[in-house]
Image: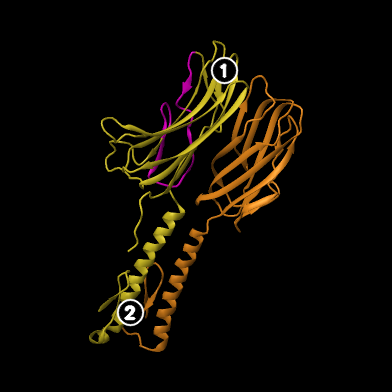
Amino acid sequence: MASVGTHGLFCIEPENYAAFALYMQCLAEQIDATLTAQQADIDAFLNRPTMIVTSAINKTWTFPNSSRTDIFDTVLFNNSAALTFTSGVNGAINIGSPISTPNPITYPTGLWMVGGTTRMATAGASNPNGLRTLQITVTDDTIPPSGQQVAQYRDQTTAFGVLDSQTVKGPVILRGSSGVRVTGVTSSTDLLATGNVTVQAGALMWVTYVGPDELVEVA
Amino acid sequence: MPGSTPNFGIAYPCVGDTFDPGLFSDWATSIENALVSVQEQALVARNRPRAAAFGTTSVAVNVSSPLNINTTTLFSHTEALVFANNIQVQRSGVYMVSAQIVAQTGATTVTNTQGNVTANTLIIQRDMSQSGPPTNFVDINVSGLVVAPAGTVISANMLWTGSGGPVNFDTTLSVAFICEA
């Protein structure tokens, strides 16, 4: 049989005519397999890994504390086994399985976007020159010797009012396989002894995969 | 009796089937149907809902006001419809939403500038307080991901405190499909 095109299809030649029925079956099955693969590519395109986490309750810190690392506590949306969430102190969105996981689930390499938004309310006394900060950090734990920060984005507002909101987003290129953490930290400066800062429920942090950052050649 | 492939049901002859033109017709037709099915899915995948529009709104002090986007539609889509002060998405999904809000003038005093984007009950907000207080506003750019079922209304709002006004605010609101939800 002679090969046709680039999808593994073929056509019969004179010596194959006796097996025409078999040819039809084989060609049908080859087309089915090729279209199934294309359908999987389309599904992957429509369902790029994305996770959104939020906070279900208010989180407060009081002088002399100046930050919290456990703001986010609830998964709002996730469409990928490559994304997991660890709540609590130093909580994080995990891109790929955390480092040292046996048989880790890998992530697609290339361009990702990360971001978040928070609303902070100041109560009690605060220096009006103080800052309120939302900081999103991407750390690749697999980069020796003990991991490396690969991106960091922050938004800051001044603490003149009772309620201020922050929003941040930015890109990051990931070329490993697993072990990446995305953390969100809220912090303040110039908080006086009788003051406190509350990050209101409904804060958001998110990651989404945009696509490969290297040229994909179609043969 | 003819067999068929597991995923797309492409028909092919089996032992005992009679070779006639109908058999070839069924085979070609089922291949055609499979190709059309994947082609339609590819078209949907390429044709992702997105929209952006611009408008101006007069906002009084201390009044939370929906912002108009009825001056210019920058781009729209059959599944992301632009209305006078909101964009409605018709396909369920996760969307990137963004609003740029800029005051045309100042006011007597400005103590806080608060802009947000709402998607049903979800709010993404950016606001800034100022001491002094000054007479100028800060520009607001707020964006993030939202989960939006079909029919979700996405809008931008402004609330400012201080004195004087009302003040005209220019708004560009945009939405872009990220993934299915």
Determine crowd level at label 1: few under 14, some 14-19, many 20+ residues with C-alpha closer than 10 A: some
What amino acid is at disc 2?
Met
Residue in view at x 71 percent, y 43 percent? B56
Q: Is residue A77 magenta?
A: yes
Residue B134 in the image: state x and y as whole percent. 67, 23
Residue A84 in the image: state x and y as whole percent. 40, 39
Per the rendering, the colour in which chain A appears is: yellow
Residue B80 in the image: state x and y as whole percent. 60, 54
Residue A1 shows in this picture: yes
Per the rendering, the colour in which chain B appears is: orange
Residue in view at x 34 percent, y 59 percent? A217
Toward the viewer: B9 or B32? Answer: B32
Vertical arrangement, residue B148 with respect to residue B65, above or below: below
Mark 1 — residue? A129
Secondary structure at numbered mark 2: helix
Q: Nearer the viewer, mark 1 or mark 2?
A: 1
Mark 2 — residue? A24
Pointer 1 indicates a residue of which chain?
A
Q: Which residues are magenta?
A: A64-92
Q: List the single residue furthest toward the left.
A: A15
